Image (spheres, helix red, strand yellow):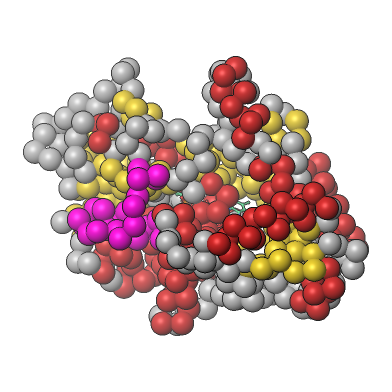
């Protein structure tokens, strides 16, 4: 069997590894470089929480991905900066504490492993945080890794197993072949068509653009994520950090979203905005925060998530300033550590908040698959998304109900650009 994977981010690289190790002939095509987009630009936080009593697809994406990172570092010997110290989500207010307590209790009932720690316990765990904080949610299985090194490690392993990775090669068209399979048109090193029995679109924030080439409308939009890093400092943070402020705001958001849906959306011509953004209709809804200290000593933090026109990577200086001030409220010594560099990347958000992983039957022709929409936590969920899509392509049972993430019923055929079978 031969498969083309479009996109050499964390999802495409992981899918290529599993496919190649199962004897599939795999070609990965990327218009940039391996880890050149979100998979190399992110904060490097990896969720945990534990498998619980009855792992659903969401738990499987998180914990399966964590396992794949462990495999890369511990079994295959890649230095990906993997750190398993855990994640603390900091709690400031009483309302945040109440929300966090209910969440931890629900997770405990499901057999998962989050813990609530008091302010005094928090200082023992993380001595540099504001001593006035109410406490934190401790995810002892939270982890972090270096995004570029980790994504490249999947690509290196895939190549070792026989995958071919072509970078600097833009996919410009997707056409079904009359006899089955697909023709993937590329522009470089010369315009040509690459044939394959199956094609996996793993193109991150550009999944909708690629699917449109096959005549399918996919509800994935580009959301810009903003980051900053300090100069390298001596070790001052043990855990990866996040803050409860946005979690509380987003837990109250569903009612507002239903109102938007009834009103036809909150963005001109754009339909319903994805959930869990920091801004709505151009105005700030909440402050979001996550970050860590890298092995080289840099503090790396970010948080703002703004729905943008695809391809807009403008760094928002005001947003970075808000995020820096928020970090300094929780970790006071950051007030003296201004951002030394800033950047942004594009995250693939779905409008309903669920990833899209599975076959795209709407195209009316077998062999087209989608693996994307992993939003703001695709570094922590991408490795398993790649493995699950490889399971589907190779006819293996993914051992979890993929119902909530399947494209069926969530993508639709575009009437104007119906894909027609090529006969050449
Ligand atoms: C600032 C920021 C911080 C984040 N922090 C975290 C975090 O801490 N933890 C976490 O879990 N997640 C985080 N994320 C989210 C995570 O990075 C993404 O969800 C994940 O990397 C998406 O992976 P992907 O493989 O789907 O897409 P990408 O990494 O975007 O890869 C898609 C690839 O497709 C290629 N492509 C696109 N169009 C074409 C074409 N026409 N032809 C050929 N190739 C094409 C692109 O060049 C790109 O390399 C963050 C994201 C950002 C931007």
Task: Indicate yes or no whether the magenta region holds residue 384.
Answer: yes
Q: Position of residue 31 (x, y in %)?
A: 42, 47
* Residue in front for this viewpoint, 6 or 378: 378
Q: Nearer the viewer, residue 238 or 401?
A: 401
Residue shown at 31% from the left, 18% from the top = 415
- Prevailing secondary structure class for the magenta stretch in the rendered image: helix
* Image height of 226 relative to 366, above or below: below
Q: How many marks?
A: 0
Q: Nearer the viewer, residue 405 or 225?
A: 405
Q: What residue do we see at 16% from left, 30% from top? A: 421
- Residue 44 sits inside the magenta stretch: no
Residue at image point 83% right, 68% down = 119
Q: Quadrant of the C terminus?
A: top left
Tell me what residue is drawn at x 68 percent, y 38 percent.
252
Image height of 103 relative to 269, above or below? below
Relative horizontal placement of residue 57, taking residue 275 as reference (left or right): left
Instruction: Check the image and name the residue furthest to the left.
Output: 179
Residue 16 seen from this side: no
Q: Percent x, y for residue 266?
A: 63, 23
* Image quarter of residue 139: bottom right
Q: Residue 372's spot in the image, x, y percent?
A: 43, 46
- State whether residue 337 is above or below residue 408: below
Query: In the rendered structure, which segment of residues is drawn in magenta?
Result: 382-406
Locate the N terminus and report the quarter of the image it occupies: bottom left
């Amino acid at each position: 069997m031969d498969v083309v994977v479009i996109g050499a981010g964390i999802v495409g690289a992981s899918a290529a590894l599993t496919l190649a190790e199962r004897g599939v002939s795999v070609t990965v095509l990327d218009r940039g470089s391996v880890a050149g987009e979100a998979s190399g630009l992110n904060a490097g936080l990896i969720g945990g929480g534990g498998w619980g009593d009855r792992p659903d697809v969401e738990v499987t994406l998180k914990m399966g991905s964590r396992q794949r990172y462990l495999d890369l570092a511990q079994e295959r010997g890649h230095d990906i900066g993997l750190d398993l110290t855990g994640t603390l989500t900091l709690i400031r207010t009483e309302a945040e504490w109440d929300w966090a307590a209910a969440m931890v209790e629900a997770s405990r009932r499901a057999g998962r492993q989050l813990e609530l720690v008091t302010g005094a316990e928090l200082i023992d765990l993380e001595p540099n945080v504001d001593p006035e904080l109410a406490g934190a949610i401790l995810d002892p299985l939270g982890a972090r890794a270096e995004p570029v090194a980790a994504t490249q490690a999947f690509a290196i392993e895939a190549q070792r197993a026989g995958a071919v990775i072509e970078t600097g090669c833009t996919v410009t068209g997707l056409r079904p072949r009359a006899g089955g399979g697909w023709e993937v048109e590329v522009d470089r090193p010369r315009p040509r068509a690459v044939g394959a029995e199956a094609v996996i679109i793993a193109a991150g924030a550009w999944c909708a653009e690629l699917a449109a080439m096959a005549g399918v409308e996919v509800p994935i939009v580009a959301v810009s994520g903003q980051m900053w890093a300090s100069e390298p400092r001596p070790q001052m943070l043990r855990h990866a950090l996040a803050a409860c402020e946005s979690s509380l705001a987003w837990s109250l958001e569903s009612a507002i979203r239903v109102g938007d849906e009834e009103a036809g959306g909150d963005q001109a011509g754009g339909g319903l905005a994805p959930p869990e953004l920091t801004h709505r209709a151009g105005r700030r809804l909440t402050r979001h925060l996550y970050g860590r200290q890298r092995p080289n000593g840099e503090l790396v933090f970010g948080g703002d998530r703004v729905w943008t026109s695809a391809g807009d990577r403008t760094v928002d200086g005001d947003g970075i300033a808000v995020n820096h001030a928020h970090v300094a409220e929780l970790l006071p010594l950051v007030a003296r550590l201004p951002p030394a560099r800033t950047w942004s990347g594009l995250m693939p958000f779905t409008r309903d908040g669920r990833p899209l992983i599975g076959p795209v039957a709407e195209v009316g022709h077998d062999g087209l698959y989608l693996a994307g929409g992993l939003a703001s936590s695709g570094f922590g969920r991408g490795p398993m998304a790649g493995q699950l899509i490889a399971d589907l392509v190779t006819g293996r049972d993914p051992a979890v109900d993929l119902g909530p993430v399947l494209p069926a019923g969530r993508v639709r055929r575009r009437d104007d650009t119906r894909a027609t079978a090529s006969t050449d």
